[in-house]
Image: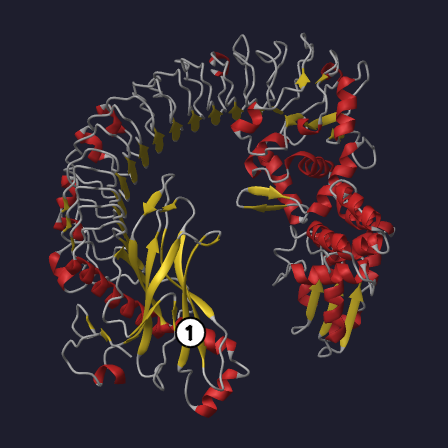
């Protein structure tokens, strides 16, 4: 991009390089080549033969095409080995086979940009709070471009606050004159097709998807095929006029303002006689004035949120715009078109009763709250690509079927009067059809033979729709959304390439056996299908299925026996069903017993749910126990049994479990700890409101947590994987006492342990933390709860700044709230590397030398426990007690100094070797 600093950086490198005796610099090659007659002769004369006889340094600035290099240097083989040639250019499309290395000059970072802008905007003057706040907006606009920052600073220097505020309002469409002059050099080098594309993107399509813009730019009268339009977009990216990232086109704000300024008014020199109307006042004036020729208008953008009064488009106005390609009438007050906001907005733009214009060149029609019952009958949509009429009044698109060979995207969402879709039956290029919220739509067209490109069909909330045709011919259909179609009770769709089917909230009674033909199905969502009683046994034949959602199927009592196995299923949600036990398929073996004994990752056998990762059984009042066989699900990470009020025991848990959420299991008594994990990942065990949980079960989980925390700490320390500011293991259960094995305890939220000398040496791997928290009916929704502690280690002559560590927490991923009403124990394990690294970073210059001189670490600490949520400290709870202990690995001096037996104050591990001791 112009002004980014390419020439400055290259010249600096040129001036400081003294290794090569022969140096040559040629600046502004493109402009000189354009202005000189016989440019090739001029270029050849610029390079003396002396250069080819010695190792040299050549700087070629602003090269615009490969031929200029060839004229200057001829055959590059003439250059002596060891020479250096540096080229600056605004176009990277031609450099691929010419250069060995490339460097794209980045913009300044935020701090550098603000410093440069302030230097030119303020100098040595003081600035007001208003200017300080606005400075950030000017810096953001410049996008790290040094030239833009300098010129904006100079323009604003000495101006008052009112001038700054007014300028920020015009910044998006009126470029600084000096910046414009620099940027326009790059614009002038574009071809006519590239200029058209650049101005269209600047005025209408910044932040749009690349494939959408490509299709809109492609036409028989400009860029030709889609491939040609894609090439034009690629050329603009090569010239740094736009960027394409993750399939989305972006344009720097300074270039966008240039494009809007150039695109607004027709100019033979800059705009090839075409205007793009985006300015509010200009648009309104143009639309309401009759009999004024507007053949230059290429696009119209109107923001109705800026309209004070309703307007009516003049009867012959669109007839006088034969070259109109883009028409967008939208409301910027809610970019996401939230239903509550949009429905409250009145329709402010009205069409004449009779529209004579065929609008043959229109490619993009986006009209929020389109006022008419159908599109104009004389409208010829042969070039239409994108049709978006959300919240419209249409009852049908047209009264007859029209040829729409280029139509790819249609959005008629929330058009509550729509009843007829037959006009779209010949849309052979249609890929996405959004009919969400079309509550009067009763039937979907039977004749879909020509809609072979349709890949996404959204019928969410079409409450009058009861069924769909089989759609066998929709060979590209991948996603079908019928969520909330409360009248839909007959599903027989058989589009064989479907990958995502959402039937949640429908009235279906069962699934057809033909569903087994959907062999590419990845997600099947049947949430809240409250009339669903059975599932076909052939469900197990869906071998590509990864996610099966049966949440809220309150009449579903049986899960089908899966004989062939669903080996790719990763998420199984069975909450709020009446299934009496974990499905029989979980009994299928998916690991070799020998592997588990030897702590080796199992090789899953065919059958079973060998890849299952997330199992949800919450709010099931039928389940009494989880069988031992669930422990054989090697990959299972998350088990959710919240509010299973009759659940009494969990016989065994899988080895690599990351989270067990048993909140509200009021009958739960026994829980067996999992086998020791082979995957080194943090774990969380939540037993809030499990008031019947036995002491043995609490001890089992606590022992497991201690062992796993120690192993994870050792692994992190050994591999030095950096800071991990999360609890390696966190546990929560009802209780009011700090476990006896915690070496340091205190009443209240603050603990001040005094530690022995050299406590952090010889095998310390982590620390254990405990907080006893009393709650006064605390509701936890999307506002997560965290228990944390603040460490402040200190000594007589050495001080470390404090730092935070989590002890544990609670979170709610669904919309429901969980309530905690009693006192609970929170236990967390974190690794010593966190503390060690914090101390080392904090004490690089001062503390570490003193430590080395004194030969010890701090022995006094202050630890304060807090309960917070996403907004700050939680008020209706209190930390009653707290505890702290050090965790050592086996074989350390601390471990070897103790007796072999389990003394009071020590915790025996599963392995019988690692212990936490009172210190």
892 or 622: nearer the viewer: 622
For the point 15% across and 81% down, the residue is 900
Q: Is residue 27 visible?
A: no
628 or 129: nearer the viewer: 129
Quarter where residue 770 is shown = bottom left
Q: Identify the residue under disc 1.
A: 862
Relative placement, left or right, of 455 versus 522 is: right
Q: Is residue 514 visible?
A: yes
For the point 61% across and 9% down, the residue is 377
Q: Name the residue furthest bottom.
A: 853
Residue 255 sits above or below residue 831 on the image: above
For the point 23% across and 61% down, the residue is 677
Relative placement, left or right, of 560 versus 341 is: left
Provide residue 460's location: percent of width, then percent of height. Answer: 42, 25
Secondary structure under badge 1? strand
Quarter where residue 682 is shown = bottom left
Residue 142 sits above or below residue 565 on the image: below
């Amino acid at each position: 991009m112009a002004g980014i600093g390419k020439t400055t950086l290259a010249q600096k490198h040129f001036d400081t390089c003294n290794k090569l005796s022969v140096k040559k610099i040629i600046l502004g090659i493109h402009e000189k080549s354009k202005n000189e007659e016989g440019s090739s002769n001029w270029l050849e004369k610029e390079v003396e033969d002396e250069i080819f006889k010695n190792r040299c340094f050549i700087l070629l600035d602003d090269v615009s095409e490969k031929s200029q290099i060839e004229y200057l240097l001829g055959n590059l083989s003439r250059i002596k080995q060891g020479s250096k040639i540096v080229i600056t250019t605004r176009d990277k499309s031609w450099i691929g086979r010419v250069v060995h290395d490339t460097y794209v000059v980045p913009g300044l970072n935020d701090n550098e940009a603000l410093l440069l802008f302030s230097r030119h905007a303020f100098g040595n003057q003081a600035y007001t709070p208003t200017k300080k706040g606005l400075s950030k907006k000017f810096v953001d606009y410049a996008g790290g471009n040094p030239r833009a920052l300098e010129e904006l600073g100079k323009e604003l220097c000495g101006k008052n606050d009112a001038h700054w505020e007014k300028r920020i309002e015009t910044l998006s469409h009126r470029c600084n004159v000096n910046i414009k002059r620099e940027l326009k050099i790059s614009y002038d080098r574009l071809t006519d097709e590239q200029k058209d594309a650049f101005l269209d993107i600047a005025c209408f399509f910044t932040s749009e998807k690349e494939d959408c813009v490509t299709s809109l730019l492609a036409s028989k009268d400009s860029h030709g095929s889609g491939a040609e339009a894609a090439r034009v977009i690629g050329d603009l990216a090569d010239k740094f006029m736009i960027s394409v990232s993750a399939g989305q086109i972006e344009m720097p704000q300074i270039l966008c303002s240039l494009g809007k300024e150039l695109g607004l008014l027709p100019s033979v020199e800059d705009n090839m006689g075409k205007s793009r109307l985006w300015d509010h006042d200009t648009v309104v004036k143009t639309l309401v004035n009759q009999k004024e020729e507007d053949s230059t208008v290429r696009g119209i953008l109107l923001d109705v949120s800026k309209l004070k009064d309703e307007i009516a488009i003049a009867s012959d106005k669109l007839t006088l715009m034969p070259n109109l390609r883009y028409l967008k009438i939208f409301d910027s007050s809610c970019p996401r078109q939230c239903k509550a906001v949009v429905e409250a907005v009145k329709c402010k733009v009205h069409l004449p009763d009779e529209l004579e214009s065929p609008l043959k060149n229109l490619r993009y029609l986006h009209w929020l709250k389109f006022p008419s019952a159908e599109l104009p009958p004389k409208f010829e949509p042969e070039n239409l690509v994108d049709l978006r009429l959300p919240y419209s009044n249409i009852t049908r698109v047209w009264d007859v079927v029209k040829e729409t060979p280029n139509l790819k995207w249609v959005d008629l969402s929330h058009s509550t009067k729509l009843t007829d879709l037959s006009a779209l039956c010949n849309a052979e290029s249609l890929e996405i059809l959004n009919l969400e919220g079309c509550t009067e739509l009763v039937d979907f067209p039977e004749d879909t033979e020509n809609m072979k490109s349709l890949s996404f069909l959204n019928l969410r909330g079409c409450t009058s729709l009861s069924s769909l045709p089989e759609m066998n011919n929709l060979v590209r259909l991948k996603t079908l959304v019928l969520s909330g179609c409360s009248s839909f009770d007959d599903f027989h769709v058989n589009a064989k390439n479907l990958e995502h089917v959402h039937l949640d909230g429908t009235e279906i009674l069962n699934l057809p056996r033909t569903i087994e033909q959907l062999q590419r199905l990845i997600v099947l969502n049947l949430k809240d299908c409250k009339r669903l009683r059975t599932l076909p046994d052939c469900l197990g034949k869906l071998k590509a299925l990864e996610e099966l959602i049966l949440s809220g199927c309150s009449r579903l009592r049986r899960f089908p026996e899966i004989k062939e196995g669903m080996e790719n299923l990763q998420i199984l949600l069975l909450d709020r069903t009446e299934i009496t036990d974990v499905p029989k398929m979980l009994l299928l073996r998916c690991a070799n017993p020998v592997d588990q004994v030897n702590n080796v990752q199992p090789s899953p056998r065919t059958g079973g749910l060998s890849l299952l990762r997330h199992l949800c059984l919450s709010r099931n009042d039928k389940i009494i126990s989880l069988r031992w066989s669930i422990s054989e699900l090697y990959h299972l990470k998350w088990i959710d049994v919240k509010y299973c009020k009759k659940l009494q025991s969990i016989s065994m848990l899988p080895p690599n479990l990351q989270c067990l959420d048993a909140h509200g299991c009021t009958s739960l008594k026994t829980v067996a700890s999992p086998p020791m994990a082979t995957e080194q990942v943090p774990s969380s065990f939540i037993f809030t409101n499990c008031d019947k949980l036995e002491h043995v079960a609490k001890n089992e989980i606590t022992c497991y947590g201690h062992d796993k925390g120690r192993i994870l700490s050792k692994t992190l320390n050994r591999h030095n994987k950096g800071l991990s500011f999360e609890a390696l293991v966190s546990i929560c259960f009802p209780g009011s006492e700090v476990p006896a094995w915690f070496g340091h305890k205190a009443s209240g939220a603050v603990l001040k342990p005094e530690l022995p000398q050299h406590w952090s040496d010889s095998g310390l791997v982590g620390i254990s933390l405990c907080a006893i928290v009393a709650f006064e009916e605390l509701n936890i929704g999307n506002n997560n709860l965290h228990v944390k502690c603040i460490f402040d280690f200190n000594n007589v002559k050495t001080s470390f700044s404090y730092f935070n560590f989590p002890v544990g927490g609670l979170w709610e991923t669904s919309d429901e709230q969980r309530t905690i009403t009693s006192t609970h124990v929170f236990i967390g394990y974190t690794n010593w590397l966190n503390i060690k690294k914090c101390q080392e970073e904090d004490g690089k210059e001062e503390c570490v030398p003193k430590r080395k001189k004194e030969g010890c670490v701090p022995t006094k600490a202050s630890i304060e426990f807090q309960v917070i949520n996403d907004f700050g400290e939680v008020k209706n709870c209190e930390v009653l007690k707290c505890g702290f202990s050090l965790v050592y690995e086996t074989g350390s001096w601390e471990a070897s100094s103790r007796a072999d037996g389990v003394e009071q104050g020590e915790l025996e591990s599963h392995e019988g070797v690692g212990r936490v001791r009172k210190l």
